[in-house]
Image (cartoon, grey):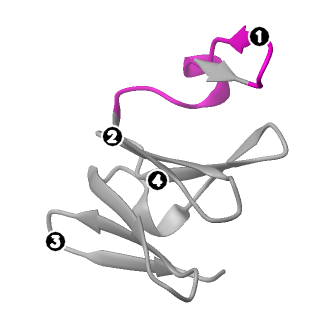
Amino acid sequence: MRYDGSSFTRIGTMDGVSSVRCLYADKKDRLWLGTTDNGAAVMEKGNFRFFDELSSMTVYSISEDENGIIYSFTGRHIYCSGK
């Protein structure tokens, strides 16, 4: 589900998103998703962007440091994305 301040929109497999494990809203108000089978994705301007480096991995946690760098944690790796 996505809420824009006035209405809810369902987000699902048609968007390439399934099995969400974690959510994170960053300082730029982007929504980050960690999945159990498709890595991580970020929603920008209503569209999801997935990261090939994490495809088919489970992302357990997503966080951000004071410089705006996003970290995605898998069982084996820590992936850092730019600002």
Name the spot of residue 46 as percent of width and height, x first: 80, 37
Comparing labels 3 and 1, the label whose residue is closer to the camera: 1
Q: Which residue is mark 4?
A: 40
Disc 3 residue type (three-letter)? Arg
Write down the region rendered in magenta.
4-20
Q: Main secondary structure of the magenta part?
A: loop
Contact between marks 1 and 4 (CB within 8 A): the answer is no
Comparing labels 2 and 4, the label whose residue is closer to the camera: 4
Label 4 to label 3, Cα distance in Å?
14 Å
In the rendered image, residue 12 lying in the magenta stretch gets the answer yes
Query: Which numbered disc flags the more N-terminal residue, 1 or 4?
Result: 1
Q: Which residue is mark 2?
A: 37
Label 3 to label 1, Cα distance in Å?
38 Å
Q: Which residue is mark 1?
A: 7
Disc 2 residue type (three-letter)? Asp
Left or right placement of residue 37 versus residue 9 in this view: left
In the rendered image, residue 9 lying in the magenta stretch gets the answer yes
Which image quadrant: the N terminus? Answer: top right
Query: Which numbered disc flags the more N-terminal residue, 3 or 2?
Result: 2
